């Protein structure tokens, strides 16, 4: 359901909207990578 709405919205936006959406997705992905790296860093710390 959510994917269908996303596809419709994607088709509805103009070129600028598409570019912004791509940049937003890339930024979100990078943020997720940073959070994941930080999570594992905390996880692997020796317990004192």
Image: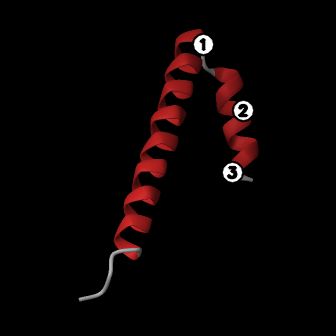
- The residues tagged by marks 2 and 3 sit, at their Cα atoms, a distance apart of 10 Å
| Crowd band around label 1 with a 10 angstrom C-alpha radius: few (<14), some (14–19), many (20+) | few
Residue sticking out furthest to the left? 48
Q: Are marks 2 and 3 in contact (CB under 8 Å)?
A: no
Query: Pointer 3: what residue?
Result: 2
Pinpoint residue 6: horizontal percent, then vertical percent: 67, 39
User: Is residue 43 or residue 10 the one in the foreground?
Assistant: 43
Total labels drawn: 3
3 sits to left or right of 48:
right
User: Is residue 2 or residue 42 the one in the foreground?
Assistant: 42
- The residues tagged by marks 1 and 2 sit, at their Cα atoms, a distance apart of 12 Å
Query: Pointer 2: what residue?
Result: 8
Pinpoint residue 1: horizontal percent, then vertical percent: 74, 53
Query: Pointer 1: what residue?
Result: 14
Task: Assign a secondary structure to mark 2.
Answer: helix
User: Is residue 14 or residue 41 the one in the foreground?
Assistant: 41
Q: Quadrant of residue 10?
A: top right
7 in relation to 1, above or below:
above
Task: Assign a secondary structure to mark 1.
Answer: loop
Of mark 3 and mark 1, the one earlier in the sequence is 3
Residue pictured at 49% horizontal, 21% vertical? 20
């Amino acid at each position: 359901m959510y994917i269908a709405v996303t596809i419709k919205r994607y088709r509805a936006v103009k070129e600028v909207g598409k570019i912004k959406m791509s940049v937003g997705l890339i930024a979100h992905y990078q943020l997720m990578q940073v959070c994941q790296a930080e999570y594992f860093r905390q996880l692997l710390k020796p317990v004192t």
